[in-house]
Image (spheres, rainbow, N blue to C red):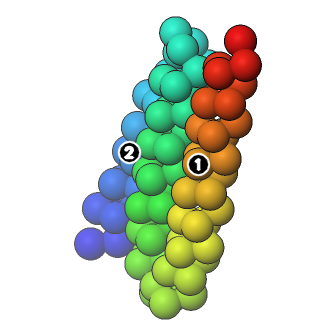
Amino acid sequence: MQDVLIYITNLLAVIIIIPFYRVLKGPTVFDRVLGVGAIGTKTLVLICLVGFIYGRLEMFIDIALAYAVLNFISVLAIAKYFKSYRKGA
């Protein structure tokens, strides 16, 4: 079971590269913001899987919740900034 979880964790780490490409090469700013949100969501799952592998899920869920709040606030702040930036142009 441990080997399966490690394999899934490695696969998820590789899957994070797909939205990272969208962040780097996105045609618009909004595609890039969406890519950052997707990376944050996949990272939350990755943190919880690592906690399950180490047998300390309760500690890693606290870390994941803090990361989720930071991810949510940062995506909102970036979207609001670019919305106001676009109005001024």
**Front position in the image: 79 or 36:** 79
Task: Indicate left or right for 82 with 16 as reference.
Answer: right
Instruction: Examine the image and state in which quarter residue 69 appears.
Output: bottom right
Amino acid type of the residue that numbered disc 1 sits on in the rendered structure: Leu
Q: What residue appears at the point 34 percent right and 54 percent down from the top-left corner?
A: 8
* Residue 80, above or below 69: above
Amino acid type of the residue that numbered disc 2 sits on in the rendered structure: Leu
**Front position in the image: 79 or 21:** 79
Q: What residue appears at the point 53 percent right and 75 percent down from the top-left corner?
A: 65
Earlier along the polypeptide chain: callout 2 or callout 1?
A: 2
Instruction: Examine the image and state in which quarter residue 53 appears.
Output: bottom left
Which residue is identified by label 1?
76
Disc nearest the viewer among 2 and 1: 1
Task: Point out which mark residue 11 bears.
Answer: 2
Quarter holding the C terminus is top right
What percent of the width, then of the height, locates residue 1? 26, 72
**Front position in the image: 22 or 30:** 30
* Residue 9, above or below 18: below
Task: Indicate left or right for 22 with 75 as reference.
Answer: left
What percent of the width, then of the height, locates residue 26? 53, 15
